[in-house]
Image (cartoon, rainbow, N blue to C red):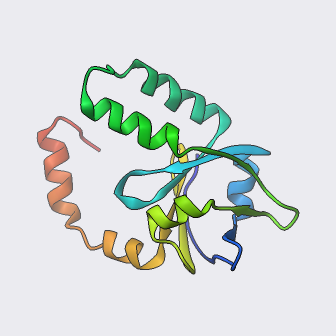
């Protein structure tokens, strides 16, 4: 399980250090792709296979399914760490997420999210009580 929040700086070549706590769980090869809310998602290979299986089951007759599938699979990049524990974030993915210098990595159970620091701060400005109420009304209880 991935959890925690870590702040890092992206270097001029687009590389960022991944915390050792996350590196140990990701393994040698992993996938970086576009995530929801204009962040990036990193999956270990096992969880990425699960995501691919779910995407493959989505009906290709619906525009929303095709859009999500293209977004996640079309932008996916198989990656690995360099000797300093850094990962290169491809330029199109950095552009999508608006990441230029300061990044925040958060664990999100089965994957890691990488956010532009300012975007992450804005994303935290939610009404958690209202969100919890909406989930409860949908039958999701924590």
Q: Residue furthest left?
A: 137
Which residue is rendered at x = 70% and y = 69% of the image?
A: 15
Q: Quadrant of residue 70?
A: top left
> Can I make out residue 95 in this image?
yes
Q: If the image is split into quadrants, where does the C terminus sit?
A: top left
- Judging depth in this view, the residue of 1 and 34 nearest the camera is 34
Image position of 83 with respect to 137: above or below:
below
Give the x, y percent position of residue 16.
Answer: 68, 70
**Residue drawn at 32 percent across, 69 percent down:** 123
Q: Is residue 106 visible?
A: no
Q: Residue at coordinates 43% horizontally, 27% vertically from top-left?
A: 55
Q: Position of residue 102 (x, y in %)?
A: 55, 80
Front-lying residue, 37 or 63: 63
Quarter residue 100 falls in: bottom right
| Quadrant assignment for the N terminus | top right
Residue 20 is left or right of residue 35, and the answer is: right
Q: Outermost residue, right direction? A: 83
The quadrant in which residue 124 appears is: bottom left
117 relative position to 2: left or right: left
| In this view, 64 is above or below 80 | above
- Above or below residue 122? Residue 52 is above
| Residue 57 shown left or right of residue 53 in the figure | left
Establish if 114 lies above or below 26.
below
The total of numbered circles placed on residues is: 0
């Amino acid at each position: 399980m991935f959890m925690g929040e870590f702040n890092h700086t992206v270097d001029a070549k687009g590389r960022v250090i991944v915390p050792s706590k996350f590196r140990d769980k990701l393994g040698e090869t992993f996938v970086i792709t576009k995530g929801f809310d204009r962040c990036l998602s990193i999956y270990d290979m096992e969880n990425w296979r699960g995501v691919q299986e779910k995407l493959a089951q989505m009906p290709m007759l619906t525009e929303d399914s095709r859009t999500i599938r293209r977004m996640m699979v079309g932008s996916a990049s198989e990656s690995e760490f360099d000797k300093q524990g850094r990962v290169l974030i491809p330029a199109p993915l950095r552009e999508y997420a608006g990441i230029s210098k300061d990044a925040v990595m958060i664990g999100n159970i089965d994957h890691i999210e990488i956010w532009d620091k300012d975007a992450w701060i804005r994303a935290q400005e939610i009404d958690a009580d209202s969100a919890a109420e909406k989930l409860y009304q949908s039958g999701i209880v924590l």
